[in-house]
Image (cartoon, rainbow, N blue to C red):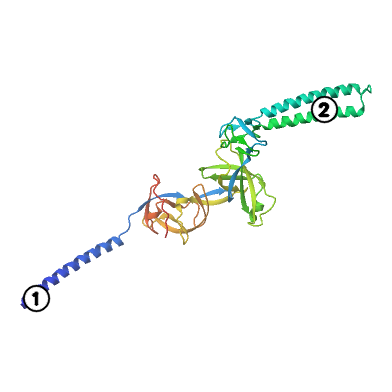
Amino acid sequence: MIKRLIIVLLLFGAAAAGVGYWKFQQFQQMNAQLTAPRPPAVIASARVRQENWQPMLRAVGSLRAQSGIEITNEVPGMVSLINFDSGQQVTAGEALLRLEDSVELATLESLKADQRLAEVQFRRTAELMPKQAVSKSEFDIAKATYESAQAKVAQQQATVRKKVIRAPFVGILGIRQVDQGQYLPAGTPIVSLQALDPLYVDYALPEREFSRVAPGQVVRLRVAAYPDAPFSGRVSAIDAGVDEGSRSIRVRATVPNPDQRLRPGMFAEVETLMREEMAVLTVPRTAISYNTYGNFAYVIGEAEGGGLRVQRRQVETGAVREGRVAVIRGLAAGERVVRAGLVKLRDGQPVTIDDSVELDDSQVVEQ
């Protein structure tokens, strides 16, 4: 019985020793993997460039037409003719709509007949006046009657003209809001008319920037409809006073719009360019890792014994323009930085450069 117990204990000890040895071997392999040098990471690089940038003031604004109105009728009437289509380009004075005017035209003919009669009577009285065949008061009455008849005809002609609605300036019509045969009270909205070339962009700047803005300065703006197509214009007017509530000053710029891609009411991001230029160091935007504890870039340098290594360096960044970032502090002109492949890097890691392909660097490094 004792021998059997000893044999069981020996077998159990052997099994435990085997498991321990197997675990020891696993630990040794893991330790070897951790201490082994990491293979070089493949990255894409870019040089730190020195460029001349124009300082700018950023703001947001709204586009508005140089001339934009809602066309309405001055006199009431029923629509007898519609002479335009929604979205049509029109010229100044072009007839858009006619109201029923048969009664007004008949009244006009009656008044013209009264005018002709009054003219005949006036001329006859004028001929008799030198002969003293009529009194001065009769002459004055005839003259006043003729002039009154002329005024009534002119008044009725104006009423008839108002029965035809015309475009007051060149522009693009909006969506028609009336129909054939509809009765329109005075002041009924018929269609909007917008002059689209040029357009205004109105925006506000802080009071402290007042001395840096003047008419004639170049502005650039972007709209959501064309994010990759900046539009240019110039400051045309600055408001006479500062808003007491926001302590800002309103600025208006004029933007050419020959292709009519811009429309009134669009939201715009506006950049007012300063007249002077300033030298800045820039890198591609993808070369900067943005995080809570400060921004950094990986600088590529020579490693001991040959090859390349990256060094993580804290940087201070400034404005972003057309995919490049201004670096205020932390980099020098001519240094090479990693522009793609930051996600897989750590400080001091060996790298190899392959600038022939664009690597996926869409993720933001947060460390």
Residue type for callout 1: Ile
- SS of the residue under disc 1: helix
- SS of the residue under disc 2: helix
Task: Look at the picture and state if 188 lies above or below 11.
Answer: above
Q: Which mark is drawn over residue 6? A: 1
Report the Cα–Cα distance between label 2 and label 1: 147 Å
Instruction: State which tag comes first along the sequence, 2 or 1.
Output: 1
Crowdedness near tag 2: few (<14), some (14–19) or many (≥20) residues, C-alpha within 10 Å: many
Q: From this viewpoint, is residue 192 visible?
A: no
Q: Residue at x 70, y 26 (%)?
A: 106
Task: Tell which of 121 and 28 is nearer to you.
Answer: 121
User: x, y percentage for residue 247?
Assistant: 64, 56
Q: Quadrant of the N terminus?
A: bottom left
User: x, y percentage for residue 26?
Assistant: 23, 63
Q: Which mark is drawn over residue 159? A: none
Residue type for callout 2: Tyr
Q: Residue at x 27, y 62 (%)?
A: 30
Q: Quadrant of the C terminus?
A: bottom left
Q: Residue at x 73, y 30 (%)?
A: 156
Q: Which mark is drawn over residue 146? A: 2
Q: From this viewpoint, is residue 117 visible?
A: yes
Residue farthest along the right direction in this orientation: 132
Task: Tell which of 57 and 255 is nearer to you.
Answer: 255
Marks 2 and 1: which is nearer the front?
Answer: 2
Task: Look at the picture and state if 350 lies above or below 140.
Answer: below
Task: Tell which of 132 and 341 is nearer to you.
Answer: 132
Q: Quadrant of residue 110?
A: top right
**In the picture provided, is 203 more to the left or to the right than 125?**
left
Q: How many marks?
A: 2
Crowdedness near tag 1: few (<14), some (14–19) or many (≥20) residues, C-alpha within 10 Å: few
User: x, y percentage for residue 49?
Assistant: 50, 49
